[in-house]
Image (cartoon, rainbow, N blue to C red):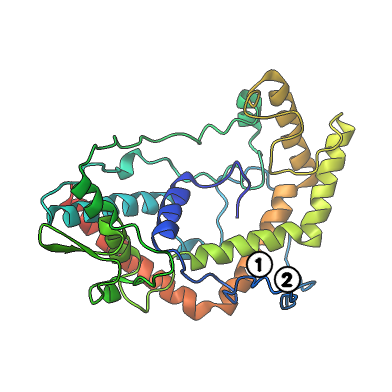
């Protein structure tokens, strides 16, 4: 959904953890992976069917932009609260076996959600000061790692499980299943240990829970479709031509680092000069205004087509946040 330098740090942390713990959850669309049989995939029904858009505003910075799918996905602050709540659940689980989980994330120290690089660098002041360096990345504190004994690690992580085993995908099923479980101190340790139990309790408590990645998936799809939309392609071409006129030919990706810039010189005087021209060309081509307007149209289409699923996802997100607030208060 975002360029390599615009991904939400908080979202990535929570989403990655959840994907690892709940591998195999469904994704938006038909949910079918390529079988490798050599057969061509089903044609995209929306290929060439670009949504209508209204007036395109002149925009530059993307930090404060609002998107239609936002109510269905947790924002940076909510993700931080969910992280902290999950750590409380891990601790509650560990206490059943006589252990503690003190590797606690705190919502108040989590990095803020940052959309400033959604369409590449677009903040003139940031470009002039830091080049392509993203000041938001790397912020926030990491909890100190605990050293653990063998049984404690087993309780936390569970058994190493054969990936072919069908472990329960929600807490409702997990409480009735013995698949991939073990025993420590006379008590059953659930599949995936306390880490997985905490994720199931918070994110997938029942079999009718909407996959927490569904709304994000619709957003990723909308971003990708917008990027290939003829109106965005034309705006990107205009931006690239503008860069060429300013002495930077060969710039074709407005969301990534330009040729000759990498982590070693991302904030150098050379990078600052390039970034300043980059932002100026985004303003001249109105790339952000066009891309944002088109992406909003694709998100609106996704909402219209998946209203029932998204409404349920929103209801469950609200319930999840209420639970997280209770856990956060109890674990303070």
Q: Is residue 114 left or right of residue 160?
A: right
Q: Is residue 63 above or below residue 210?
A: above
Q: Nearer the viewer, residue 101 or 159?
A: 159
Residue extending furthest toward the right: 245
Q: Is residue 258 left or right of residue 105?
A: right
Question: Residue 145's quadrant in the figure?
Answer: top left
Residue extending furthest toward the front: 162
Q: How many marks?
A: 2
Q: Is residue 298 above or below residue 6?
A: below
For the point 83% across and 54% down, which residue is it? 234
Give the image location of residue 8, x and y in percent.
50, 47
Which type of secondary structure does the marked residue at label 2 adopt? loop
Do tag 1 and tag 2 residues touch (Cβ < 8 Å)? yes
Circle 2 residue: 51
Q: Nearer the viewer, residue 329 or 30?
A: 30
Circle 1 residue: 298
Which type of secondary structure does the marked residue at label 1 adopt? helix
**Label 2 crowd bin: few (<14), some (14–19), many (20+), radius 10 Å:** some
């Amino acid at each position: 959904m975002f360029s390599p330098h615009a991904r939400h740090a908080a979202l990535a942390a929570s989403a990655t953890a959840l994907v690892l713990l709940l591998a195999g959850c469904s994704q938006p669309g038909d949910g079918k992976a390529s079988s490798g049989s050599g057969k061509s995939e089903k044609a995209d029904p929306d290929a060439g069917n670009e949504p209508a858009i209204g007036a395109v505003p002149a925009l530059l910075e993307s930090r404060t932009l609002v998107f239609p799918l936002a109510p269905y996905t947790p924002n940076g602050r909510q993700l931080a609260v969910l992280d902290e709540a999950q750590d409380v659940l891990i601790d509650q689980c560990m206490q059943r076996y006589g252990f503690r989980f003190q590797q606690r994330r705190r919502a108040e120290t989590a990095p803020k959600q940052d959309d400033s690089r959604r369409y590449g660098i677009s903040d003139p002041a940031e470009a002039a000061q830091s080049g392509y360096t993203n000041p938001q990345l790397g912020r926030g504190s990491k909890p100190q790692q605990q050293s653990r004994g063998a049984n404690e690690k087993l309780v936390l992580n569970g058994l190493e499980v054969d990936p072919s085993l069908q472990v329960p995908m929600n807490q409702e099923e997990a409480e009735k299943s013995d698949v991939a479980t073990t025993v420590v101190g006379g008590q059953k340790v659930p599949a995936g240990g306390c880490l997985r139990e905490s994720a199931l309790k918070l994110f997938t408590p029942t079999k009718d829970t909407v996959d927490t990645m569904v709304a994000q998936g619709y957003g990723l799809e909308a971003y990708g479709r917008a990027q290939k939309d003829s109106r965005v392609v034309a705006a990107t071409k205009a931006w690239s031509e503008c860069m060429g006129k300013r002495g930077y030919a060969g710039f074709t990706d407005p969301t990534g680092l330009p040729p000759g810039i990498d982590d070693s010189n991302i904030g150098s005087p050379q990078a600052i000069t390039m970034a300043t021209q980059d932002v100026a060309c985004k303003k001249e081509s109105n790339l952000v205004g066009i891309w944002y307007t088109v992406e909003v149209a694709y998100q609106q289409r996704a909402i219209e087509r998946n209203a029932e699923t998204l409404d349920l996802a929103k209801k469950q997100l609200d319930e999840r946040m209420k639970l997280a607030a209770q856990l956060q208060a109890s674990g303070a």
